[in-house]
Amino acid sequence: MDIGDDNYQAVTLKEVLRGVIDAVPQGTNRATRQSAPPAAAMGDHGDGSAKLTQAAYWQAIQGYLRAGDVLIAEDGTSYAAFGLHLPRNCTFVSQAIWGSIGYTVGALLGTLTAAPERRHLLFVGDGSFQLTAQELSTMLRHNYKPVIFLINNGGYTIERCWLGKTAHYNDIATWAYADLPKVFRPGTTARSFVVKTAADLQNALSAPNDSLIFIESIMDPNDAPAGVISGGNSGADLDYGPRGPQHRDNMLLRPAP
């Protein structure tokens, strides 16, 4: 179907699934991997004072994982969690194929209730979090102790990989995310951090997990893992076809040359 200069073609579920499979790093079953990849495989991010990047962020997360963790991964750039190498007996919760953003905040409440004896890690973006943020209140009321990793990159970066790299519809309102535990439960013992560098992140990761930990990581809106960018670009081609708007200049976030 043509609308003006744009061409839209029918997309089957089989094509979508193939795009998702191709975007995920291939390898052995991540749930049974025993060790993290060497640091060199993820890049050298030794300058702790440099602005935090997605690459340095996920390298630090990889080192933070331990056996038995429950990981809940949101859509968006948190989709990069699919590339983590999981220690023994970890559980990985996601629903990327449905694209139900905000799902994971409620899912975290569910996993905490089902297995409060385990450590629960939520990986979520600012846009997704804004949809279901109130679930944080219930977690605090029940004294649950998850570690919430929130990427604050000013909106829907994964959508910038699809279409609208600089479009206002991919921007969202600015929140003071790390202040929310105190908003939802005044007097809470939850620990909150706003991190802007790799050193800031390492400091937050060293905090004892005897209460809820909320880590807000500030990143560039146009910084995204390579797999997320390629997946978004492929999704745009599936959705809009060979003559779609994504092929116009600067319409979507592309991989670095």
Image: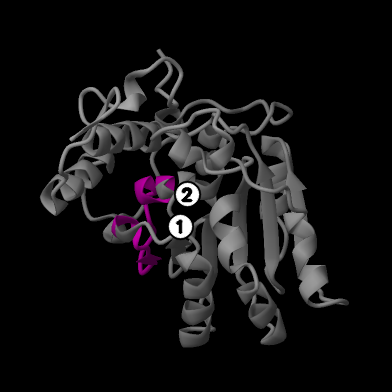
Q: Secondary structure at mark 2?
A: helix
Whether residue 84 appears in magenta in the rendering, the answer is yes
Q: Amino acid at mark 1?
A: Glu
Residue at the farthest front position: 4
Return the x and y of residue 66 as percentages of the image width and height: 48, 61
Return the x and y of residue 76 as percentages of the image width and height: 45, 47
Could you say which is closer to the camera, residue 213 or residue 152? 152
Magenta-colored span: 80-97
Query: Quadrant of the rendered structure where residue 49 is?
Result: top right
Residue named by callout 2: 78
Measure how far apart labels 2 and 1 are at the Cα level. 6 Å
Position of residue 30 in the picture relative to residue 11 (left or right): right
Vertical placement of residue 145 versus 247, above or below:
below
Vertical placement of residue 87 versus 231, above or below:
below
Disc 2 residue crowd, few under 14, some 14–19, many 20+, Cα 10 Å: many
Vertical placement of residue 162 versus 17, above or below:
above
Return the x and y of residue 106 as percentages of the image width and height: 51, 74
Residue named by callout 1: 74
